[in-house]
Amino acid sequence: MIPEPVRLHNPTGPDRVAVVSAAEAWGTPGSFHVLVARGPRAGKLGMGTTYGPFTVEELADRFAEVVAALGLELFAEAGRSLLIDALLDARPQVRARAAARLGWRRDRGAVGPLIAALASAEGETCALLDALGAIGDPVAIPAVRPFAGRKLLSRRRSAVEALRLLGDLEGLAEHADRIRATLPEPLLTALDAIDPDDPRPGAEDAIVSVFPSVEDQYRGLALDTLYELGTPVAVAAIRAVLPGLRFDRVYHWRYLKSIYKRSMLRHDAVTFGLLSHAIEARGRQTKGVAASVKSGLDGGVHHTRIFARPTQRYLRRLAWRYLRNLARHRPDRYAAAAAEALVPYGPEDAREPSGLYGAFADCYLLNRILHNQGDRLVLDHSRLSFRWRDADSFRAPADRREEAFPDRWDAHPRAYLRLLGSSRLPSVHAFALRAVEERHRDILGDASVEELLPMLRAPHEPTVRLGLDELRRRFDPEHPDLLLVDRLIADQIPEARELARSWLRESSPLWTRDAEWVVLFTTSGDPDLSMLAAGLAADRLKSDPGLRRILSARLLDLFRQPEAQPGSLDAYLLIARDALLDDLDEQLDLDTLIHLILTGPPQAQALGGDLLARRPEAVEKLGLEGLSQLANHEIAAVRAATHALLRLAVDRFRDDPGPLLMLVESDWPDTRVVAFGLLRDGLGPDVLGPPGLMGLLDSNRVDVQDVARVLVLRHVDRFDPVELVPRLVEHPHPNMRRFALDLVIDHLPDGAEALDRLSWFFRAALFDLRPERPVKRRIINFLRDRGLRDPFQARVAAELLGDFARSATRSDADRALHAVVSILIAHPDTPSDVSIGHSAGGVA
């Protein structure tokens, strides 16, 4: 970076003014001269002296040496004497402004006068302390230390931050011991339980989690105390908690304002950016509230407004004033601070456009940073809102830059990477993208993966494309960065994972040679990618028993853990089934396998089922009761394995068919099918006996009833239909009633006694209020046929048919009468209310 010109003044010498500057050496690109111009006044400087040329790396040191040499001649920065004289002014506000300007200049020659002014300071005490801290000369430590113990928050704050900048570790440690005791108990306990200097993301979670337990009125003070401690964990916790606080509450706002001022003194760009945006955003929601507040200066209670509009406007201007001073006096810090101020802006900050007021007209700091050097926007000072100058101003110029201090951005272009990775506004992305593509393309090559990956989730498609292109450019399939692949696999960004998949395919000839990478990629945590890796490494798995053993052991570890989310282990189950069953079978004893089936996640249970089918010894281990339980398992693979074991154990059911009879009532159709097969073909009716068959007939399941009917009909000679029919008729399912009718018609023994014993059945069927006509016709035909056989059955049949004929509908009555007549013709002596007459030439 080329140093800024320095103006020096010597009130006693012949040359009172000197200007030191740097410029590129003519005809020697990349080299620079240091130029010194001197004269009696600014308008009359001589040609001066030229030093160099110097390389860009040594330019800053040589420039500083020239300035120091002029200091030996009693030259000092221009204006110092006036500012030092101003420290003696009668007005405190003049003294405070002079101290602030001396602090920004970081002129060590001003330390003595500042310390002297501190002894008699009044309202300007904080400004003097801030200036001493900004200059950073340890000589000031003894003068600053006493103020770190002051009760007044503003003075204590300035003193502590000054000690931090002065590097007074001892004084800071003593102060930290004092203020730690003021923290609420939950926060102090959480802070003591962790390493305060742990910089890792998430280390602050312990503090954040207990913060809600702190009483609301003490939360602001607790946060300011944590920020005063200044450890990485404490600062990270504050940034996480700040968005949830109310700015218009007195016991919040006093300390939020304190943190805000500390962030500027400390040059903590991230906290400064968060609070600058929060003050602006909350200001759109509230005008503040009235409250009675005790003053730290006089101890009196004053009625005032908290977070009122004047306060909001003052702090919004202060944010820009701070950035402007950074650009002028600490140019190396400006770009980073400006980037952090832009990052918190998002779509929620937009308003409804109105006339020349655009969507982001109220975003004061955003417009200051991005458009301050242009002339398209006009500031409404009373509202701190920007409007377009005219309708033609909506279009951004293509040939000039509008951002404030563009040379500061160019000197530190890595700030653009921060915007591309974290900003949520497309307009900010367009600003940073234009700078990178036109002037600073080389910073992408120096960017870390942590800086490139966030670009893939940007709300601006060209930014996403730029990040992807840079990552692709870096990847060499012949020399793959597999650590980078692994990081992308674990990323939450879909584009990153898709890029990792493509790299995995391209570099598979190399990583599949390494067992550690094969195991890592096939157990990546991304099921789809694990399947891809397994497919790419399939040949290696087939030919490498050692690798299979390592991978199977790793998969077993995964299967013993609960699923992170439903389906997350599906890919590992497929890998295990395709390539590792033999190896897994070797590593699991029977007890462990059964435990995996009973307690593992669904995929582990399915895998256990596959392996259980290979273990005939499990029949002895589980017994009939255990097999029956597993046959009703919800995992199909477990049931399938159990079915195979049940077939091996069929002889055991001969002594105790009870479990098998329970399995035919299973909720799982495949288990019932196996049980049916064993009952029908494996055991047969001899083992079941009539009681067992009757138990099957009692089932409410149609498929069980069908099997029972087949078995009964196959061995109908073992049953007495006269005893069986009543039981079937009592069954609620219509299938059994139809089966009862089939048994009666097809298997009722001949003779009047059997027919008479089932007369109730025939009556119930014939006189049913909701009859089935085919059933009635079958019974009528059956009774007619039985009545024709002999006089004894004719009597029973004629009585039943006659009773039915008197109450039935005409069609059924006619059919019943015809049946009776047929019986009477065959057996004329059969008693019946129906008689046959010939007088009319027909039946009466």
Image: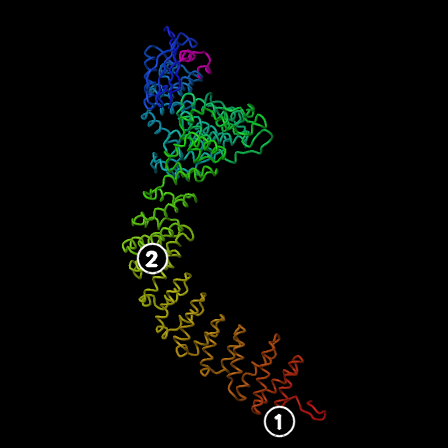
Closest to the observer, 290 or 280: 280
Q: Which of marks 1 and 2 is nearer the N terminus?
A: 2
Q: Residue furthest right?
A: 840
| Residue that mark 2 sits on | 579
Query: In terms of secondary structure, where does tag 1 sit?
Result: loop
Give the residue type at disc 2.
Ala
Q: Position of residue 623 (x, y in %)?
A: 34, 68
Residue 54: image tag: none
Q: Which residue lies furthest to the left in this view?
A: 546
Question: Residue 157 occupies which quadrant of the picture?
Answer: top left
- The residue segment tinted magenta is 78-96
Q: Distance between the residues labelled 1 and 2?
A: 86 Å
Residue at (37%, 70%) from the top-left corner?
647
As drawn, 522 above or below 441: below
Q: Position of residue 362 (x, y in %)?
A: 54, 29
On whether residue 87 falls in the magenta region, the answer is: yes
On whether residue 666 falls in the magenta region, the answer is: no
As drawn, 524 above or below 156: below
As drawn, 33 above or below 340: above
Question: Residue 660 occupies which quadrant of the picture?
Answer: bottom left
Q: Position of residue 164 (x, y in %)?
A: 36, 25
Residue 829: image tag: 1
Determine the main secondary structure of the stretch shown in magenta: helix
Mark 1, Cα crowd under 10 Å, few <14 / some 14-19 / many 20+, is few
